[in-house]
Amino acid sequence: MKRILTVILLCLISVPIAKAGDCTHTDRTPVHELSLGVGDQLFENLVWQNPQFIVDNMGDDWSSVYRERYRYSQHWFFDYYYNMSERLALGVRADFSACLWDEVLRSGSGGEISREADCFFMNISLLPKARWSWYHSPALLVYSALGIGLNINTGTEADAYGKKTACGLAADLTLAGVQYSFSHWYAFGELGGLTSLKDKNTIYMLGSRIISLGVGLKF
């Protein structure tokens, strides 16, 4: 009985001591990172733009549908990282981007017959990520990262398979990233690319979000 009481007493004493040790370590070296970032849509700007020239010499008995007024949301993403060590961090990234346009029916003389506004497609990606730091100091971090996960593409139009919503593989490569910390806050910039495809004939993104900027909190 005395042995049991001794073991219980030692356990009760060791728990607050361990917690106190953990708190001291957390105060000294935050292990969690939470951030919000924004990136470009250069790929979407190059592929989806206004490629059609209005034909205005066919007469009013002829008409055609034109895609006009393209708009881009840019990429918005949330990151969470857990620092396993000074070099290695594991986490997840959730990324959102969209492209909108108007579908306009015009007569052969160029006149507008009808307009369907705000046609769109969007990509939602969820990617587990690993980050490796090439240089580490209390204020500065230089790193590369790789994430592989799932992309959901959806919108107002059906794809070649007749589906308006489809899933594909997504890969997010950060060739080089720089993080500058001040207290528990930090700012970062990344150079890389996000790619997503269903097969060789269905590519949702190819090197999109080349440049990214963001801010975050360590805790």
Image (spheres, helix red, strand yellow):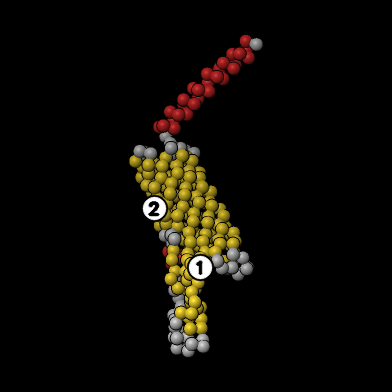
Residue at x 48% of width, y 83% of height: 107
Q: Amino acid at mark 2?
A: Leu
Task: Estimate the x, y position of residue 72 in percent, counting from the top left.
Answer: 44, 63
Q: Nearer the viewer, mark 2 or mark 1?
A: 1
Bin the neighbour count of mark 2 within 10 Å (Cα to Cα): few under 14, some 14-19, many 20 and up. some
Tell me: residue 189, above or below residue 116. Answer: above
Q: Is residue 13 in sight in this rendering?
A: yes
Instruction: Work out whether residue 49 or residue 4 is closer to the camera in this orientation and state it.
Output: 49
Disc 2 to disc 1: CB gap under 8 Å: no
Count of marks overlaid on the render: 2
Secondary structure found at label 1: strand
Query: Rounded to the nearest whole Å, what is the CA distance between mark 2 and mark 1?
Result: 28 Å
Q: Give the residue at mark 2.
A: 213
Classify the position of the C terminus by image quarter: top left
Q: Which mark is residue 119?
A: 1
Left or right relative to 179: residue 154: right
Tell me: residue 139, above or below residue 56. Answer: above
Q: Amino acid at mark 1?
A: Cys
Residue at x 49% of width, y 22% of height: 17
Classify the position of the N terminus by image quarter: top right
Q: Which mark is residue 197?
A: none
Task: Estimate the x, y position of residue 78 in percent, counting from the top left.
Answer: 47, 49
Secondary structure found at label 2: strand
Instruction: Work out whether residue 144 or residue 16 is closer to the camera in this orientation and state it.
Output: 16
Task: Estimate the x, y position of residue 103 in percent, counting from the top left.
Answer: 49, 73
Tell me: residue 215, above or below residue 12. Answer: below
Instruction: Work out whether residue 143 or residue 194 is closer to the camera in this orientation and state it.
Output: 194
Specify the farthest residue to the top: 2
Specify the farthest residue to the right: 1
Residue at x 45% of width, y 88% of height: 57
Task: Estimate the x, y position of residue 95 in percent, counting from the top left.
Answer: 49, 54
Residue at x 55% of width, y 61% of height: 153
